[in-house]
Image (cartoon, coloured by chain):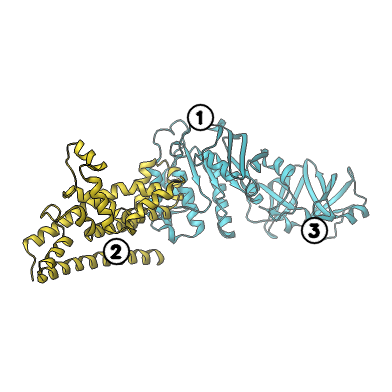
């Protein structure tokens, strides 16, 4: 039982995709989560709903809408081709874009909870200590929300690794471009290559287990640290 | 300069069910206590001064600098203030030393050359008595210790005004006593003006130079503590009337642990809780512990017998059988709570000359 070259390629592509998506999501998810945690705007609820949608929608539905939107005649497609970028379906960046939306709640929600948990007091405290908004964010909010950031990053990463339906709809299976591990497994099964499917599935299983183990273990250590005081 | 500085405040702010409309000048030196019952708007006023709350309208000028008006709103991190919150708030991700350094690193370096006040790290740590706490985390500290660290941190930002929002509220009796003496020490050793919010008469009497009394978001009265207490508050923390006497320790009887204090119009004996000769003292005397006689009785256990003249006799709200007699001893006001029956029996009336008796043990040296 060993991984073939195309299996390895699929794994590397998956990691590349998940890494890129996690990075982008941490960057755009943080301001969204911050806004959601602090705004008193009445339409906050709408944003909350939109962010949470991917949790309940079948991935094929999301994939379908993206396929339409990113196609040459869709709203996203006309912008990207207008910019000379071509159309996104069946490209790596198309997958990145769709995955960002698909995994958004997994990043925004832990961050939003973390920010809400911090409350106003530490921020006001810092403000009376001559700490400006950026300084406060970097030296107070980020350290206090660290568990939230770690959970958000791990969940965003792991969820992107595990996606299948969206990729199938808008990515197809171009090796090295859109053929991620979950698609590769599907292909192996389709072509009756059960041994390869077993191997790759085992790798994915191990990965998922390790990630969750790490998150729970780390959180447990954190809690005992705090409650042990 | 700092000594003559003034805080000109005109703040209007309203939200659901509450409006604050405060217009006053606050002395930029000593301790000004903002006093009021809960819901009177005192914390909101303090938060407006700090910039943590933005008023709807008004003007705030401190030492000639505009902090707020129609066009200007200086955010809190640009105001030269220190702020101590009600429940001791320290950064949980930093130890005590880290909390103090957070302030130290952000303190303006240049702005204090003119005033000559720069508080060094070691000085502040010593003053607040937090040397032994430095390596500890906030969660490992008692409420009182946390509040000491919070005060030390507020001082290390090198503030020109120190704002304190009910810093004793969450502490037990011991913690309160401990922290009050720290605040008194600050008053003596650090010449930073302090604005102090509280609803405790005891704290007012103990530390205030001036008092600003708020009621339903409006200034009810303002002035030095003796005047405000005797004219407006005259109730102790238990809700019962009393009088406030400013005195100086003039003698100590170490054999009996009794101290003699002199006030304008006479002298009193009270329990000596470690006073120093010449020390200024404010003492609260509950009106129910002051009794009136027509002649001087020297054969009782009561140490304090003073000649007094009745200024007025008023009825007490909620106690139809009692009367509050206000008397003067020299220039000092005393209050005695007696029964209506005694008023009739002794034929007490305005201008009458009487003797008042006060038990030494009942005098509170707040």
Q: Nearer the viewer, mark 3 or mark 2?
A: 2
Does residue B361 appear anywhere in the picture?
yes
Extreme left residue here? A5
- To which chain does the residue with label 3 belong? B
Instruction: In the rendered view, tell whether residue B195 sits above or below residue A3.
Output: above
Does residue A23 appear anywhere in the picture?
no
Which residue is label 1 attached to? B66
- To which chain does the residue with label 2 belong? A
Which residue is label 3 attached to? B302
Q: Position of residue A83 (x, y in %)?
A: 20, 36
Badge 1: residue crowd in 10 Å (few <14, some 14–19, many ≥20): some
Q: Earlier in the sequence, mark 3 or mark 1?
A: 1
Q: Position of residue B331 (x, y in %)?
A: 78, 40
Badge 2: residue crowd in 10 Å (few <14, some 14–19, many ≥20): some
Badge 3: residue crowd in 10 Å (few <14, some 14–19, many ≥20): some
Distance, label 3 to label 2, CA atoms, is: 72 Å
**Is residue A205 found left or right of B18 in the rendered image?**
left
**Is residue A17 found left or right of B145 in the rendered image?**
left
- Quick one: B18 or B349, which is closer to the camera? B18
**Is residue B317 found left or right of B168 in the rendered image?**
right
Instruction: In the rendered view, tell whether residue B161 sits above or below residue B269.
Output: above
**Is residue B153 found left or right of B234 in the rendered image?**
left
Picture disc at residue A215: 2
Give chain A's shade. yellow
- To which chain does the residue with label 1 belong? B
Which lettered chain is shown in cyan?
B
Q: Position of residue B21 (x, y in %)?
A: 62, 37
């Amino acid at each position: 039982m060993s991984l073939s070259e195309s299996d390895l390629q699929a794994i590397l592509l998956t990691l590349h995709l998940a890494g890129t998506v996690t990075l982008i999501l941490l960057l755009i998810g943080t301001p969204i989560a911050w806004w959601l945690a602090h705004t008193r705007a009445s339409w906050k609820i709408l944003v909350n709903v939109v962010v949470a949608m991917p949790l309940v929608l079948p991935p094929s539905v999301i994939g379908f809408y993206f396929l339409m939107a990113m196609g040459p005649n869709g709203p996203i497609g006309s912008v990207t081709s207008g910019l000379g970028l071509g159309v996104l379906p069946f490209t790596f960046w198309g997958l990145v874009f769709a995955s960002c939306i698909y995994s958004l709640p997994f990043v925004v929600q832990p961050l939003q909870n973390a920010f809400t948990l911090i409350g106003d007091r530490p921020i006001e405290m810092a403000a009376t200590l001559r700490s400006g908004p950026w300084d406060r964010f970097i030296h107070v909010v980020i350290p206090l929300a660290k568990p939230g950031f770690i959970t958000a990053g791990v969940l965003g990463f792991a969820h992107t690794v595990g996606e299948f339906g969206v990729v199938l709809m808008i990515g197809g299976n171009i090796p090295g471009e859109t053929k991620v591990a979950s698609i590769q497994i599907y292909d192996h099964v389709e072509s009756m290559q059960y041994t390869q499917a077993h191997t790759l599935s085992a790798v994915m299983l191990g990965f998922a287990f390790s990630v969750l183990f790490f998150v729970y273990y780390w959180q447990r250590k954190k809690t005992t640290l705090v409650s042990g005081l | 300069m700092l000594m003559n500085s003034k805080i000109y405040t005109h703040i209007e702010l309203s939200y659901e069910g509450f409006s604050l409309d405060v217009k006053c000048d606050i002395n930029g030196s000593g301790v000004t206590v903002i006093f009021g019952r809960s819901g009177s708007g005192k914390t909101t006023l303090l938060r407006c001064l700090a910039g943590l709350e933005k008023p709807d309208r008004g003007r705030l000028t401190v030492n000639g600098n505009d902090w707020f008006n129609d066009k200007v709103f200086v955010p809190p991190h640009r105001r030269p203030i220190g702020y101590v919150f009600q429940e001791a708030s320290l950064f949980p991700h930093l130890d005590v030393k880290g909390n103090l350094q957070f302030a130290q690193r952000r303190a303006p370096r240049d702005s204090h050359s003119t005033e000559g006040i720069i508080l060094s790290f070691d000085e502040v740590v010593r003053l607040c008595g937090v040397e032994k706490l430095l390596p500890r985390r906030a969660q490992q500290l008692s409420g009182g210790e946390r509040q000491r660290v919070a005060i030390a941190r507020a001082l290390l930002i090198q503030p020109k005004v120190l704002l304190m929002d009910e810093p004793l509220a969450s502490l037990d009796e011991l913690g309160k006593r401990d922290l009050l003496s720290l605040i008194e020490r600050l008053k003596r050793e650090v010449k930073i003006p302090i604005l102090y919010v509280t609803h405790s008469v005891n704290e007012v009497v103990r530390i205030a130079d001036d008092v600003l009394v708020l009621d339903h978001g409006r200034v009810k009265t303002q002035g030095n503590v003796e005047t405000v207490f005797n004219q407006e508050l005259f109730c102790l923390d238990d809700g019962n009337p009393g009088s406030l006497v400013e005195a100086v320790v003039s003698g100590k009887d170490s054999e009996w642990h009794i101290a003699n204090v002199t006030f304008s119009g006479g002298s009193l004996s009270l329990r000596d809780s470690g006073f120093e000769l010449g020390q200024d003292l404010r003492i609260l005397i509950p009106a129910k512990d002051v009794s009136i006689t027509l002649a001087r009785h020297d054969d009782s256990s009561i140490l304090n017998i003073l000649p007094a003249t009745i200024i007025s006799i008023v009825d007490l709200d909620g106690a139809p059988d009692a009367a509050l007699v206000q008397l003067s001893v020299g220039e000092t006001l005393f209050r005695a709570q007696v029964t209506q029956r005694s008023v009739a029996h002794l034929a007490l009336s305005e201008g009458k000359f009487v003797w008042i008796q006060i038990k030494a043990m009942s005098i509170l040296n707040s």
